[in-house]
Image (spheres, rainbow, N blue to C red):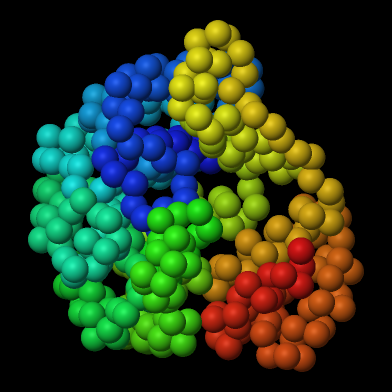
Amino acid sequence: MGWGIYVHIPFCVRRCPYCDFNTYAGIDYLKQPYVDALIEEIARTGERLGRPEARSVFFGGGTPTTLSGEQLCSILEAVRRGFRLDPGAEISSEANPGTVDAERFRSMRECGFNRLSLGVQSFDDGELRFLGRIHSASEAVDAYHLARRAGFESINLDLMFGLPEQEPESWKAALEKALELSPEHLSLYALTVEEGTPLWRWVRGGEVPPPDEDVSAGMYEYACERLDAAGYAHYEISNWCRRRDGTDFRSRHNLIYWRHERYLGFGAGAHSFDGKKRWWNVPGVREYIDRIAEGASPVESGEVLSERTLMGEAMMLGLRLLEEGVPNDRFAGEFGVDIMTAFGDEVTELVDEGLVRWHGDSLLLTHRAWLVANQVFARFL
């Protein structure tokens, strides 16, 4: 089974106050050296592994579309040279509506990108300003239409809910605007306050009230009902997709993560997993570039995971898939024991509490567990 390929683009025009990802603003002078380093790392890895099969590619960040279309396409071409990319592979890129134009989208589509994930976050200009986004609501709509005109037939919109003092009516309006656009996929995330971010300091200092968990829960429940009525399949806790004409618009790359399968990460801070061990690159952009230029490994560290940890991760990730869950035969094929042998006590307790259920041979979260999923996952880790 082929690898999933993740390519990390760490550049942003401006860092959002809630973001704790490995991203940087104000280092545009490093873009081309970084692209060159990425191409070299991909080539080395592909050669070392004997040009293996790959079945998905995902450019994330950061903001991949801060790079030019030519730069993005040169990285994708390096992936094609280093790996045997499945002809039907999903090739995705995140895109910020404030950093796109018709020519960039056209270039990306022509060189093989076939899916876009637009970081819209909100259709309310006041909320966008609070979130530190560099685009307006109208620019988000314009970016969506630009992508359509460039030929993208698979588009995801990211939206955030549960902002401090966000009114439920604003969230309902955002969903209606998204449904009006009719994307193939929607990812909806509750705003979380990550330690060390500006938002965390604002909340801690009393400048901004913390998100209200009860209000967030109500927004999530409303979204579940509204998107179901609109014909979107709720296939993962935070993700919905359309299914039409025999085409399934689930994120095939993210399915690799949720199914606990193999992936390779390229770029500063990128993580990789081969089924037994995990490793990650140095996070600093300059250090990453320098290591590649010196012919050294960009890997900062790694770990060989215990069988028990691997089993727990497989349960935690697989249970996020609301329709599929964790198939017992897949679990047994990976670990040599079935779910009840590995986690009999935990599963029995969770079934009794109404938080998980068996559907045929697969273990799934119940609807009741969707809002407390992390409490369920903790039982396995």
Q: Is residue 250 above or below residue 151?
A: below
Residue 145, by quadrant, is bottom left
Q: Residue at x 77, y 53 (%)?
A: 310
Question: How many dots with numbers?
Answer: 0
Residue appearing at x 53%, y 33% in the figure: 283
Q: Is residue 300 visible?
A: yes
Dividing the image into 4 quarters, which one contains the N terminus?
A: top right
Instruction: Give the percent coordinates (x, y) of residue 176.
Output: 21, 78
- Extreme top residue here? 294
Q: Which residue is depicted at the point 19% across and 32% down?
A: 107
Q: Is residue 330 left or right of residue 57?
A: right
Image coords of residue 263 (percent x, y):
58, 40
Relative to residue 21, is residue 351 drawn left or right? right
Question: In the drawing, does residue 362 fall left or right of residue 368?
Answer: right
**Residue 328 visible to the viewer:** no
Q: Nearer the viewer, residue 231 or 208?
A: 208
Residue 280, x across and y down, in percent: 62, 35
Image height of 221 relative to 257, above or below: below
Tell me: residue 165, above or below residue 246: below
Q: Quarter holding the C terminus?
A: bottom right
- The x and y percentages for residue 16 are 34, 52
Q: Residue at x 50, y 29 (%)?
A: 284
Q: Is residue 363 above or below residue 39?
A: below
